[in-house]
Amino acid sequence: MSETAIESARDEEPGAVTASYLVAGHTLKSWLTTTDHKRIGILYALAITVFFFIGGIAIGLVRLELMNPKGAILSDEGYNRLFSLHGIVMVWFFLVPSIPATLGNFLLPLMIGARDVAFPRLNLISWYIYAVGAAFTCYAIVAGGVDTGWTFYTPYSSLYSNSNVLAAALGVFIVGFSSIATGVNFITTTHMLRAPGMTWSRLPLMVWALYATSIVMVLATPVLAMSLLLIIAERYFGLPLFNPSEGGDPLLFQHLFWFYSHPAVYIMVLPAMGVVSEVFACFARRRVFGYIMMVYAIMAIAIVGFLVWGHHMFVSGESQYANVVFSFLSFAVAVPSAIKVFNWTATLHRGQVTFEAPMLYALGFLGLFTIGGLTGLFLASIPIDVHVTDTYFVVAHFHYIMVGGSVSAFFAGLHFWWPKITGRLYSEAWARFAAIVMFLGFNTTFLPQFIMGYGGMPRRYHVYPQEFQVYHVISSVGALILLSAYLLPLIYLGWSLLYGTRAGDNPWDATGLEWQTSSPPPKENFEEIPVVNAGPYHYHPAEEAPDAARREPQEAQGRKP
């Protein structure tokens, strides 16, 4: 809607501009044809929730199988297909789009004072592309699954696998275009649609994180698409690309795959870093310590992240010189990550910290991401990496980063902006309980995997020596706790939608443009485009901090103090 149209609507129909985006059409068609970035964010949220539980059920069966060292429940083939399904669904259809496509879509225009993204129709098309890719993957599942693992390593995937590689690879190939479209939209929106006065040095860190993530998505995702096309070319057209007997090189695939897939880790983690920066500042009532350094760290992680893919291949036959270079660069990328952890800690130091649910989830992110980051240094070291390659040590490490970190931050952001998204409050007690159970369940699941991985337990095996059974049983019990913790938000947030107390426009007394509009926001976001005249995070200094009791009971958050 143009500015003129908005003015016209305001004159003719009072309230037309300020009506909630949720009531701007109740039919299914109004949702499936919407170009409103907020509704598209909701569509993505519904889609990734479905895949989250599909992947969760698959790994639940895998953990049941691993409680017995003889593997009494599943066949070899069934086990391979289940852990492959878990990896493919969780990485490509949940973790990669989780924060950027859901919270990012909903929040980016609001946080920079825009009425929508730069290309609203492209935004809707990107969701349909995601849906088409998801349909191919669902077909692969229904038709019997795929057994290549989420990495599609060649020459197994291109020559030997009898599973549904084509459908699964096409699903991932197609969903990549959704990421590219979203990235282009976010980059253009950030450049072109910032509110008056919203300079680059005044951008919230969440926006910086989405901007850096978008650059990675646009530059890296085409390489993944090309890799998957080459698999299809060899598998169905016989091109000798990765088959050593025909002169091909399987290492070529690994280079191409990891050139995308290591930056893909930052597609998951950088938005998570943006979320917790917003949450820490709000619930510590302090400006983010070292804002400029945080921005540089975000961009440094995005850039250096392109240069470390080779550390996934220390035992694959790379030259020693290449291994040393990739090891050095892997240590180097830890520096900006450490800067961010230090600055978050300094932000909390002497802050008036309160422990609402978003803060608990964000603290969970801080702990789990730190463990994941520190164990990543072990894997950057060539001798240790050789010892633990393809063991459960690696499984534990990447789950601490990609699941412990990203999913904790996703829940932190979901709870923080839930009142803004829905206009409703949730049960603070249940939300705090779920955050604590999730943290405990996650560590019960994955801490034992560091121990058995260091002891030599290989990944992807469902029959294993008796000595590892106790660790697998603890890990499986932890997975059950974790699954329960993941179900809790589904219940109390669902209850909130139906019966939750009405939220005020700014229940957390937070800064940021998104809190200056109503909850839920109107279709056009702002009745008048705001003018920005200061940097982000203008919270009260300590001596002027508001009474903590004012923010304590969430039941009271619907009213402004």
Image (cartoon, rainbow, N blue to C red):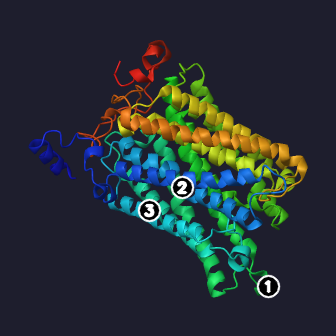
Please name the amino acid that badge 1 sits on. Answer: Ser
Residue 275 visible in rendering = no
- In front of the other: 294 or 552: 552
Which residue has dot 1 on it?
245
SS at circle 1:
helix
Q: Residue at x 61, y 40 (%)?
A: 484
Q: In the displayed orientation, state which residue is furthest to the left.
A: 12
Q: For the residue carrying disc 1, how many other residues have a C-alpha within 10 Å: few (<14), some (14-19), or many (20+)?
A: few
Compared across the picture, whether 543 is left or right of 247 comes to left
Which residue has dot 2 on it?
51
Q: Residue at x 45, y 37 (%)?
A: 493
Q: How many marks?
A: 3
Compared across the picture, whether 131 is left or right of 246 comes to left
In the image, residue 467 lies at what x, y percent?
A: 90, 47
The CA distance from mark 1 to mark 3 is 39 Å
- In front of the other: 389 or 84: 84
SS at circle 3:
helix
- Res 137 quadrant in image: bottom right
Q: Residue at x 52, y 25 (%)?
A: 429
- In front of the other: 552 or 386: 552
In the image, residue 398 lies at what x, y percent?
A: 70, 50
Please name the amino acid that badge 3 sits on. Answer: Ala
Q: Residue at x 52, y 36 (%)?
A: 412
Compared across the picture, whether 490 is left or right of 33 comes to right
Residue 490 visible in rendering = yes
Q: Nearer the viewer, mark 3 or mark 2?
A: 2
Which residue has dot 3 on it?
181
